[in-house]
Image (spheres, rainbow, N blue to C red):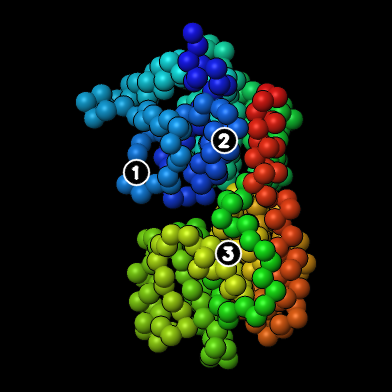
Amino acid sequence: MMTEKEKKPSIIFYIGSLSRGGAERVIVNLAEYFHANDYHVTIVTKMREKVEYDVSDGIDRVIADITEEEITGSRLLNLYRRIKKLRNIFKQIHPEHIVSFIGKNNLMAIAASRGLRIPVTVSVRSDPKREYPGRANRILVPVLFGMAEGIVLQTTQAKEYFNHRIGKKAVILPNPLNYRFIKPFYDGERRKEIVWVGRMDDNKNPKLLVDAFSEICKNYPEWKVIFYGDGDNAEQIKKFCDRQNLGGQIVFAGKVDHVEEKIDQSSIYVLTSKIEGMPNALMEAMALGIAPIATDCPCGGPAQLIQNRENGILIPVDDKQALKQALRELVEDTTFRQKISAKAYEILEKVHPDVVNKQWMDYIEQT
């Protein structure tokens, strides 16, 4: 007699880890949706981090990396052993479909599944030039991606990176919003807070917001900037704020659980990144009705969410003057800010998890 697991359709989601990042959050959301829709779900990761997203009981977790004893001085031999171990996992579970996220993981998933007759969908989560740098990848990616049954991209700019054969096969699917960010629109008086959420590193570029706000903050003493997150640049930025005596108006809240409870009813959200795929934090802020300012960065994620001056403001990458002007306008013009806020909230119709998760499931089941 068949077991309950054998009766259910089976799917593997493959990613480096479940650490606190945007792509990891999306893959967990998708895994939960497939699990809720009667799939046997396995999440395969290269490693297990100390701090990770939780998954429901009933979703299996497999670690695919080779052990310290198996690691040799040869990179090629280590790569071979990693692919072999991943292939054995795929072979043992033999799901109806494999979904892989990000960079080398996608190439590994395709290589490890060859000959097993398991459809593979790969997803590029950022600028393809960033995920696949160098000459070797320019040769290898078109070959391996040509073997994938499905290719999911996040923006039209990302699609333009690939040749016609790959681009024709690819589909653009949005990220599913986390259910925690679905709330009734708040049309009351919002707190005079400008919020920023993410890893405090060079790419996320939080210093741009500090630099811009520090030059105008004396004109708006009742307003604060609150940073939610931590990272390599956090201490350096904090020291700069201390030297400038900005502690009262620039607050570093660090990593927090349930950030939606912290930023709900804030007035302005700022994204300062140099490169983004589809920025979850921006999407989530908009779904809470927070008026957004975002850099128009490659590979086009913010521009895919924001119609400039309709439901947010787009600014050039690393442009302090443009950010200062956008902040002044939203701070000073309450009517304009409220209009942007209401239009931003409408993003919920496009990125509601019930809508987007079904789009993913329909695509995967058809490939």
Query: In the image, residue 336 lies at what x, y percent?
Result: 75, 78
Secondary element at image label 2: helix
User: Earlier along the polypeptide chain: callout 3 or callout 1?
Assistant: 1
What residue is pinned by disc 1? 49
Q: Residue at x 70, y 70 (%)?
A: 341
Query: Is 346 in front, or is 161?
Result: 346
Can residue 223 be seen in the rendering of this structure? Answer: yes
Q: Amino acid at mark 3?
A: Leu
Q: Residues within 10 Å of mark 2 (few under 14, many from 20)?
A: few
Indicate whether 340 appears above or below 303. below
Residues at marks 3 and 2, CA–CA distance in whole angstroms: 33 Å
Q: Amino acid at mark 2?
A: Ala
Q: Which mark is residue 271?
A: 3
Query: In the image, residue 308 lies at what x, y percent?
Result: 75, 65
Q: Amino acid at mark 1?
A: Glu
Q: Residue furthest front?
A: 1
Q: Nearer the viewer, mark 3 or mark 2?
A: 2
Q: Are marks 3 and 2 in contact (CB under 8 Å)?
A: no
Indicate whether 303 appears above or below 269. above
Query: In the image, residue 55 lies at what x, y percent?
Result: 45, 41
Q: Nearer the viewer, mark 3 or mark 1?
A: 1
What residue is pinned by disc 2? 36
Indicate whether 74 appears above or below 295. above
Q: Residues within 10 Å of mark 3 (few under 14, many from 20)?
A: many
Q: Residue at x 61, y 63 (%)?
A: 285
Q: Residue at x 68, y 37 (%)?
A: 358
Secondary element at image label 1: loop
Q: Is 3 on the left-hand or right-hand side of 191?
A: left
Q: Residue at x 36, y 30 (%)?
A: 63
User: Earlier along the polypeptide chain: callout 2 or callout 1?
Assistant: 2
Residues at marks 2 and 1, CA–CA distance in whole angstroms: 25 Å
